[in-house]
Amino acid sequence: MPLAVSLFRFSTPVTWMTAALLVARLYDVSFGLPQMVVIALAGAILSFGGAGIPMGALLILAPAFSAVGLPVQGIGVLLAVDLVPDMFRTLSNVTGDMAVAAMLSRRDLDRADVHEAAG
């Protein structure tokens, strides 16, 4: 479970997509479906290597922004306003981790009941 918590951050692709849309709007850059797909895939893949610290995902956002033609300077704006969204990211990650832990625990209890009834 600790490995899963440190690796799987469910909110990174959604957060990166929102950040990219904000920066595209601020800098008046066209941002369509292909760029959205690239950002979402990059967020899903790169979230495995990001630091588990507040605003850690923003540290690895620059290559994704460069790949889709967004100005990397926009990350500075995101750093300034990221406190509140970071709280919601943490909430969604913790909720996802707790849900998986509850499902695994329930599955183990069901298996124990089956073994107990058979024995």
Image (spheres, rainbow, N blue to C red):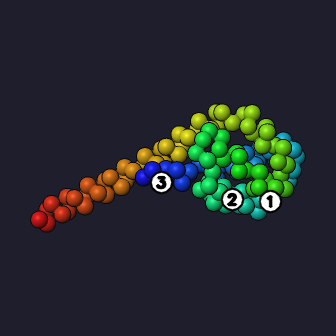
Provide the residue designation for mark 3: 3
Tell me how far mark 1 sits from mark 2, CA to CA.
Answer: 10 Å
The residue under label 1 is which amino acid type? Ala
Provide the residue designation for mark 1: 67
The residue under label 3 is which amino acid type? Leu
Q: Residue at x 71, y 50 (%)?
A: 60
* Crowd rating for badge 3 (residues with CA inside 10 Å; few <14, some 14–19, many 20+): few
Task: Name the mark nearer the viewer: 3 or 2.
Answer: 3
Tell me how far mark 3 sits from mark 1, CA to CA.
Answer: 29 Å
Determine whether the residue tagged by mark 2 lies in a helix, strand or loop.
helix
* 55 lies left or right of 93: right
Task: Name the mark nearer the viewer: 3 or 1.
Answer: 3
First along the sequence among labels 3 and 2:
3
Provide the residue designation for mark 2: 42
Q: Residue at x 42, y 49 (%)?
A: 99
* 48 lies left or right of 109: right
Q: Are marks 1 and 2 in contact (CB under 8 Å)?
A: yes
**Which residue is the extreme one toward the left?**
119
Query: Residue 96's spot in the image, x, y percent?
Result: 48, 48
Q: Are marks 3 and 2 in contact (CB under 8 Å)?
A: no
